[in-house]
Image (tube, rainbow, N blue to C red):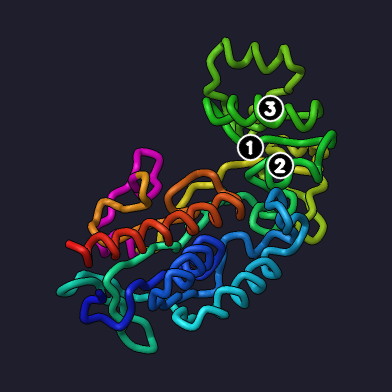
Amino acid sequence: MRNNTDFDVIIIGGSYAGLSAAMALGRAMRNVLVIDGAKPSNRFTPHSHNFITQDGRTPAQIAAAAKEQVLHYPTVKFMEGVVRSAGKQDGGFTVGTESGSFSAAKLLLATGIRDVLPEIEGVRECWGKSVIHCPYCHGYEVRKQETGILADGDMAMHLAMLISNWTERLTLFTNGTASLNAGQAEQLRRRNIEIIEEAVISLVHETGYLKSIRLQSGREHQLSALYLRPGIRHSNLPEMLGCGLSEAGYLKVDDFKRTTVAGVYAAGDNMSPMRSVAAAVAAGNAAGAFINNDLIMESAG
C-alpha cells in the first residue's frame, strides 16, 4: 500500500549506488524517481577497475549502460537536476528541484561525496589520473613504478604499508615536519621507504599525468603516481534532513542502510570509506531490497 505521495521512493543521486538501488526497486515494481546532477566524483578518472565484467571501461560507459538497463523497468523514472531542498511531510518526504517538488514515502541518499583536495598546484589536474586514492582501483596500472604518498601520522603509516604491496619504489612526503612516532619511522626505514619532510610546492605533470613532485627547496623528485586521501564533504541534504554522521564523517547507517532519520536511507560513497564502483553497486542493491522490505512490513502493519 502506498502513502499519498508521488512515488514510493525518491533516490537522490543516479550514479552506481543510486542506479543499483533503482534496479532492485524497479524489479520489485516500486514507483521510483531517480534525480541526478550528473557530477559523479569519479568523472575525472579515465578508466574504472576492479569491478568484475566491467574492468577497464570508463566510468561514463558503465553508468550509461546501467541507466539504460534500469530504465527498462517502467516504474522507474529518471530526471536530471539538483535537489535543492528535502524535508519530512505527512506520511513521507518532499524534495524540491528547479523543475518542481516531488514526494515519496522513502528517500535514498546516493549523493556520494565531494573530494576536498590539498591546495597544491597540479593536484586537481592530476586527480583521478596519476594522483590517486585507492591501490585496488588504480595500483595495478602503476605497479613497480616510482610512487609517492602524501600523508602524515597514522594515515601515512597505513598507506605506506598497504601500497608497498604494489611497489618497492615508494617515498613518503609529509608536507612538513612529520608526526610519525619513532617506531613508525623506523619501520618505514626498514622497508627502505624514504621520508621527506619538506613542504610540497607543486606537481609537475603533462595533461594530468605526473612527472615529478617539486619541494620547497626547489628540488624535484621523479614520480609516476602519488597517493593521498582527500577530505570529504557532503551535500547539504543530510544536514537538512537531520541525518547523523559517524566519527569518520560518513553518514551513519545501520545494517539495513537506514540513516538516523526514519525513512531515509543511504548507499555508496557517502556512507562508507570503501570507495569503488563494486562497493557502491553492492550497497545500492542492498539498500533497494531493504527499502522494499520496509515498505512491505509497514503496509502489513
- CA gap between label 3 and label 1 equals 10 Å
Find residue 178 and report its horizontal and vertical position in percent.
57, 25
Q: Callout 3: few (<14), some (14-19), or many (20+) C-alpha neighbours within 10 Å?
A: some
Numbered disc 1: secondary structure: strand
Q: Which residue is mark 2?
A: 226
Image spot of residue 237 (x, y percent): 33, 65
Q: Secondary structure at mark 3?
A: strand
Queried whether the magenta region covers residue 241, the answer comes back as yes
Q: CA distance from mark 1 to mark 2?
A: 7 Å
Give residue 61's position: percent from left, percent from top: 70, 69
Q: Give the residue drawn at x 68%, y 24%.
A: 195
Local secondary structure at mark 2: strand
Q: Earlier in the sequence, mark 1 or mark 2?
A: 1
- Along the polypeptide, which appears first: circle 3 or circle 2? 3
Residue 62: image quadrant is bottom right
Q: Nearer the viewer, mark 3 or mark 1?
A: 1
3 or 1: tag closer to the N-terminus: 1
Q: Judge left or right: residue 154 versus residue 206.
A: left
> Mark 3 sits on what residue?
196
Q: Residue at x 79, y 54 (%)?
A: 209
The amino acid type found where label 1 is placed reads Leu
Q: Which residue is mark 1?
A: 150
For the record, the magenta segment spans 237-254
Against 70, is 144 above or below?
above
Q: Cβ–Cβ below 8 Å for labels 1 and 2?
A: yes
Give me the residue at 54% from left, 44% from top: 274
What's under tag 3, amino acid-wise? Ile
The residue type indicated by label 2 comes to Leu
Q: Nearer the viewer, residue 155 or 210?
A: 155
239 vs 88, nearest the viewer: 88
Magenta segment main secondary structure: loop
Q: What is the quadrant of residue 7 in the picture?
A: bottom left
